[in-house]
Image (cartoon, rainbow, N blue to C red):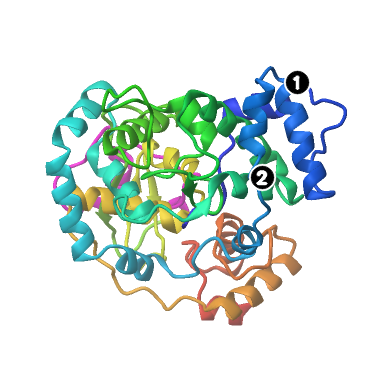
Amino acid sequence: MLRPAPRALALALAIATAPLPALAQSCGGSFAGFVQGLRDEAVARGHDPALVQRFFAGVRQDPKVIAADRRQGVFQLDFTSFARRLISQNRIQTGQAKASQWAAVFDRIEQEMGVPRGILLAFWAFETDYGGYQGDFNTANALVTLAHDCRRPELFRPQIFAALELYAHGDFDPATTTGAWAGEIGQVQMLPADILENGVDGDGDGHVRLKTSAPDALMSGAKMLRALGWAPNQPWLQEVTLPAQMDWSRAGLDTALPPTEWQTLGVAPRAGGWQADLPASLILPQGKDGPAFLAYPNFSTLFEWNQSFTYVLTAAYFATRLEGAPVFDPGNPAPGLDGAQMKRLQEKLAARGHDVGEIDGILGAGTRAAVRAVQAELGLPVDGWPTAELLNRL
């Protein structure tokens, strides 16, 4: 599972902010006492006591879930290395076969929701290898374990009651439902609250079963993307070529210009024409000499599905490949920093007053912003790509 953290959607927040019975623990304490508090809270919310008892009867604390939560949630690989690792010829061929197998479902999704098949195929591939591996953690145990742990209980506690609601509908079995360590279920990995909010019975059998039904999973994923802000029938990513010299400070997701302005700056589509007359941001994942893309507004929506920049960019690019785009040009970027070097860079940036978040050796949004700031201070190209030269200058 590549997702660094689960999303807290509106339904989950509503559940989280509902009044709690006096005996309920917010987190921590004895596990048995915590589970009893969940039972009391569920009954107080109006659930049938017998159903509540059955739901929580077999719940156990799972130390493997805590271990998974403490591990690094995102890769330290650069975009090119990450993309080459995740995008194999087999995954492309399987994606093409799945697109053909489920063509009628994808046609319906595109007509009714405006979500392209490439995006859904990309997440289907990366999340579970097209449903081939969906995780083997008991979902009820994972959610209760993470809610009991006091690191992020506000994210996981509402999911328990969402799972209980699914159980009442006959769409969740606390004894047998399995998925990712963080509680995501099914072929496109959705949390219980997401399923309650956006689940679709795509095959018409009267249930929403994301583990066994591809139509249910794909249509539910599409509905969730729409709920997260996906604009129907609009592009998301386009590879571009760059001039040898330009104002590199224009790059980054915080700047969006119409194609006419990018064209004036010397930016051009690598294949075909401009995809839309929409504001777009120039993305340079490995600096000015590496791959280059224009990200349209829909690209930002994908961060609601996954918070890792490299993961999202790779999924977005893979979606374009599945819809006919050529292999991207990796360029000739300066070598990036390894984990230890990145930590030293973050320490130096923090010492200069920049907020890079945790010193973790990961090139996240805060570190990229700090790199751009010091590049400007030092008179270097402001492309957000940390190199050994920059580290030495600092």
**Residue 50 in the figure: left or right of residue 390:** right
Query: Which amino acid is tagged 1?
Result: Ala
Specify start and end residues of the magenta stretch as a single range.
249-278
**Residue 242: percent from left, percent from top:** 29, 58
Q: Quadrant of the C terminus?
A: bottom right
**Residue 160: percent from left, percent from top:** 63, 36
Q: Which mark is residue 144?
A: 2
**Which residue is at 24% across, 43% downward?**
118
Q: Quadrant of residue 264?
A: top left
Pointer 2 or 1: first along the chain:
1
**Which residue is at 58% across, 26% downward?**
10
Q: Magenta includes 325?
A: no
Q: Is residue 7 above or below residue 203?
A: below
Q: Is residue 240 above or below residue 23?
A: below
Specify whether residue 274 is in view.
yes
For numbered disc 2, what is the local secondary structure? helix
Residue density around tag 2, few if under 14, some if 14–19, many if 20 or more, within 10 Å = many
> Which residue in the structure is indicated by mark 1?
44
**Which residue is at 77% across, 28% downward?**
40
